[in-house]
Every structure is written in structure tokens, then in C-alpha cells.
Image (spheres, helix red, strand yellow):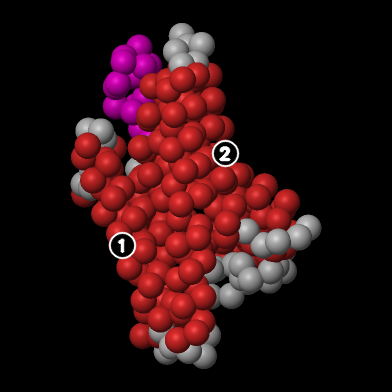
């Protein structure tokens, strides 16, 4: 059973925010183009994303969700291992299958320019993952009253991914590509939820989000490679995370024994 009233309120609030923000962002885009300042767009993006991140952190505190985004030494170590493994496996896969890819640090631009232009995607990743994978996910989960915990989680992930897609609709291309872009974003929402729920580390989802948005590994300028990058991220992430969980399982089994393992 789902508390439809509460769920509809959440959906309508997200929809209202999207509708309200779209004309504002569109007007900013027009003003930036008129200014002829090459750095204006990046500066505005920084401001928007930093404000969004501050709002997300405020909401985490308001709803007592800060526990879900807490940084620790274990969290940081897991993140480092994930980043290095993701980069290594992705490069191996794209070379094995002769897929188009590029590393952003191999371009002709200076490091300073690349960092300035792309670092704000880190704020995008953090802000959106905090908002959708933590705040909205747990708020929606609270509206679903079912005994089956896994079914509750699946429904919450699907609804959250739908809202994530809806929030990105103004950014999608117009035309036939829009269908593929929409499906790609929806699939990405589900994938990000998997990353967070499987690892319990929101920063893993945030860094994967950053890699995709900033085009660190795969060229996202063409729709085909944008979708391809999502699939490669999914494959490599599942390999990394599931190998980690298998190793953790056998380690705990060895330490705690067969009888007591399920209690740990």
C-alpha cells in the first residue's frame, strides 16, 4: 500500500520546482550569450550548483538524514579504491572492444582550464545524489507501507528515478534524440540508486555521476556514446562492487564462522 496523498505532494513539489527553475535558467542562458563572456556560463553554473548543494545539505539536516552522507576513513578508502578500479577497468574494456573514448587529461587544453571548466560537475554530482538518492528516496520510502522490504525499495527507486528524469527534461535535446536521452537518464537514476544502496556510500554514486557529466572517460558529446558510457559505467561498477561484496562475504564467513555469519 502507498500513501498516495503524501507521494503526490512530493511529486508535485518536484514538478513545481522544475517548472519554476526552467524559465529562470533559460533567461540566464540568454543573458550569458548576450554578454559574450566565455567564462560567464561556467561562473553561473558554479553559483547555481553550489547553491543547490547548500540547499541539499540544509534539507539533509532538516530531515535528519545527515547520517546517510557521513564521511569516514572507511568511506574515503572505499571511494579511492572504487575510482581507481573504475578508471582501470573502463580503459581496459574500451580498448578490448575498440570503443571510442578519451581521457580529459589527454586533451590540448591546460590542466587549469580543464579543472575550472569541469570541477563544478563535482558539485552537480554531490547535490543531485544527496537530493535524489538520499532525501527523495527516503521520503518516498516512508510513503510506501508494504511488508516486503525489497518491494518497497524497488518502488521507491523507480519513482525516484522517474523524478530524476523529470527534473532533467528541460535539459534534454529536442527531437528524436529526446526519447533516448530520457531513457538514458532514467537508467542512470536506477544505476545510481544501485551504487548507493549496494555500497551504502553516497560518494560512490556521486563520483560516478561526476565522471559521466564531466566526460572524464567516455565522450558524451554524441548520444550514442552518452548511452554507451552509462552501460560501461554500469558494467564496471557492478564488477567492482560485487567482487568487493563477495570478498567481504568470505572474509566475514572465515572470521565469524558459518553459524554466526548471518548475525553480523
The residue under label 1 is 50
Tell me whether circle 2 and circle 1 mark residues in contact (CB < 8 Å). Answer: no
Q: Is residue 233 left or right of residue 136?
A: right
Q: Height in image: 40 above or below 258?
A: below
Q: Is residue 225 left or right of residue 54?
A: right
Local packing at callout 1 (Cα closer than 10 Å; few below 14, some 14-19, many 20+) is: some
Quadrant assignment, res 141 = top left
Quadrant assignment, res 140 = top left
Name the foreground residue: 41 vs 138: 41
Q: Residue at x 43, y 38 (%)?
A: 13
Total numbered circles: 2
> Helix, strand, or loop for circle 2?
helix
Position of residue 35 measured from the top left corner of the image (x, y, whole percent): 45, 86
Which label belongs to residue 227? none
Asked if residue 189 shows in the view, the reply is no
First reached walking from the N terminus: tag 2 or tag 1? 1
Name the foreground residue: 43 vs 98: 43
The residue under label 2 is 162
User: In the rendered structure, which segment of residues is drawn in magenta?
Assistant: 244-264
Q: Is 256 inside the magenta-drawn segment?
A: yes
Separation (CA) of disc 2 from disc 1: 24 Å
Asked if residue 224 shows in the view, the reply is yes
Our reading of the magenta stretch's main secondary structure is helix
Q: Is 249 inside the magenta-drawn segment?
A: yes
Q: Residue furthest right?
A: 176
Name the foreground residue: 214 vs 87: 214
Q: Residue at x 46, y 16 (%)?
A: 3
> Helix, strand, or loop for circle 1?
helix
Q: Residue at x 46, y 9 (%)?
A: 147
Position of residue 145 measured from the top left corner of the image (x, y, whole percent): 44, 13
Q: Residue at x 59, y 75 (%)?
A: 102
Amino acid at each position: 500500500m502507498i500513501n498516495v496523498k503524501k507521494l503526490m505532494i512530493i511529486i508535485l513539489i518536484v514538478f513545481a520546482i522544475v517548472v519554476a527553475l526552467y524559465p529562470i535558467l533559460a533567461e540566464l542562458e540568454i543573458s550569458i550569450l548576450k554578454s559574450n563572456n566565455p567564462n560567464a556560463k561556467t561562473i553561473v553554473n558554479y553559483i547555481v550548483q553550489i547553491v543547490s548543494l547548500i540547499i541539499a545539505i540544509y534539507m539533509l539536516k532538516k530531515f535528519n538524514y545527515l547520517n546517510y552522507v557521513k564521511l569516514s576513513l572507511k568511506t574515503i578508502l572505499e571511494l579511492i579504491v572504487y575510482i581507481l578500479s573504475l578508471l582501470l577497468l573502463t580503459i581496459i574494456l574500451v580498448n578490448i572492444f575498440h570503443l571510442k573514448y578519451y581521457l580529459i587529461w589527454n586533451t590540448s587544453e591546460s590542466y587549469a582550464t580543464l579543472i575550472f571548466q569541469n570541477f563544478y560537475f563535482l558539485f552537480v554530482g554531490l547535490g543531485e545524489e544527496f537530493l535524489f538518492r538520499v532525501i527523495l528516496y527516503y521520503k518516498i520510502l516512508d510513503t510506501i507501507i508494504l511488508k516486503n522490504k525489497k518491494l518497497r525499495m524497488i518502488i521507491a527507486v523507480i519513482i525516484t528515478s522517474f523524478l530524476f528524469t523529470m527534473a532533467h527534461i528541460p535539459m534534454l535535446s529536442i527531437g528524436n534524440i529526446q526519447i533516448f536521452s530520457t531513457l538514458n537518464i532514467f537508467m542512470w537514476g536506477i544505476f545510481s540508486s544501485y551504487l548507493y544502496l549496494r555500497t551504502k556510500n553516497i560518494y560512490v554514486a556521486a563520483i560516478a555521476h561526476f565522471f559521466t557529466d564531466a566526460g572524464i572517460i567516455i565522450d558524451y558529446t554524441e548520444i550514442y556514446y552518452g548511452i554507451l558510457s552509462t552501460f560501461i559505467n554500469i558494467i564496471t561498477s557492478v564488477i567492482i562492487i560485487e567482487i568487493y561484496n563477495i570478498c567481504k562475504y568470505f572474509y566475514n564467513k572465515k572470521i565469524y564462522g558459518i553459524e554466526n555469519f548471518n548475525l553480523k
